[in-house]
Image (cartoon, rainbow, N blue to C red):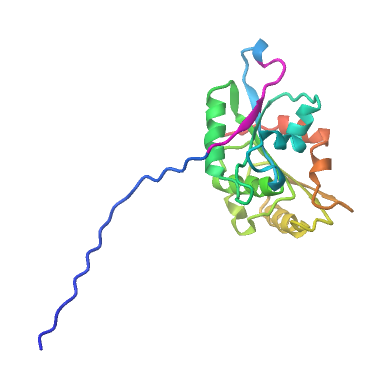
Amino acid sequence: MQGCAAQSHLIQDELDAVTVENLQYYLYYPEDYFDSDKEFPLLLFLHGGGESGRDIGEIKKNGPPKMLAEGKQFPFLVLAPQNPHVKKWWNTQAVVQLMDSVASNNRVDKKRIYLTGLSRGGSAAWEMATQYPEKFAAMAVVCGMAPVPYAHWIDRDLPIWVFHGEEDKVIGVEESDRMVEKLRNMGQDIRYTRYKGVGHNAWSRAYTTDSLYTWFTKQKRIN
């Protein structure tokens, strides 16, 4: 009996895969934007799971969009996209593409782009800080899940402010505890506000902290 050798063919190829995401968004301009030629900072805000879907008005329920709807004015542009998926994570690649487009088509100081998010949006903010460390001048995270094993991917010079409620039953405060501890051990410039007696809605207090926005405007990338 004569043996028969099996032949295998390994074909190497590549494909440019494109992900398309339709993102609705609000874009706020400061009062003096259209009366000057200067560049302005930009704040990117990522909402939580409860505001996901196709009704863009939902994102006015919390955070900076809520404050804007109530008449608050900010000294920077505010970009607030909506996650169209009720039960999916943020597509952070699409968010970055949107942010870059807005920054390029408006008078935005690219060394003063700030990032913030709450709950699911806070988790996305942590992700973006690890995946795009060169993009942001400062970040504030409110009760988000933290990618502790990848903390070392975050820009060491990125100022960070973390907020979390000690009684959070949705995303436990331990998420922020561990991340803050690891970042501090690496010498990160980080603030941590841990609210006693507060549950998952820590954003109600965090985003009405005036010093948060003053802190943002003091930050600028050095490279």
**Which quadrant of the figure contains the N terminus?**
bottom left
Residue located 67% across and 10% down the image: 35
Residue located 19% across and 75% down the image: 6
Q: Percent x, y for residue 33?
A: 67, 16
Q: Percent x, y for residue 28?
A: 68, 25
Residue 3 counted in the magenta span: no
Residue located 63% across and 16% down the image: 38
- The image quadrant that residue 176 belongs to is bottom right
Please state the extent of the stretch shown in magenta in the rendering.
22-33
In the image, is residue 162 above or below residue 41? below
Query: Residue farthest to the top?
Result: 35
Residue 32 counted in the magenta span: yes
Q: In front here: 155 or 88?
A: 88
Q: Percent x, y for residue 169?
A: 79, 58
In the image, is residue 56 above or below residue 32? below
Q: In front here: 204 or 148?
A: 204
Query: Residue farthest to the left?
Result: 2
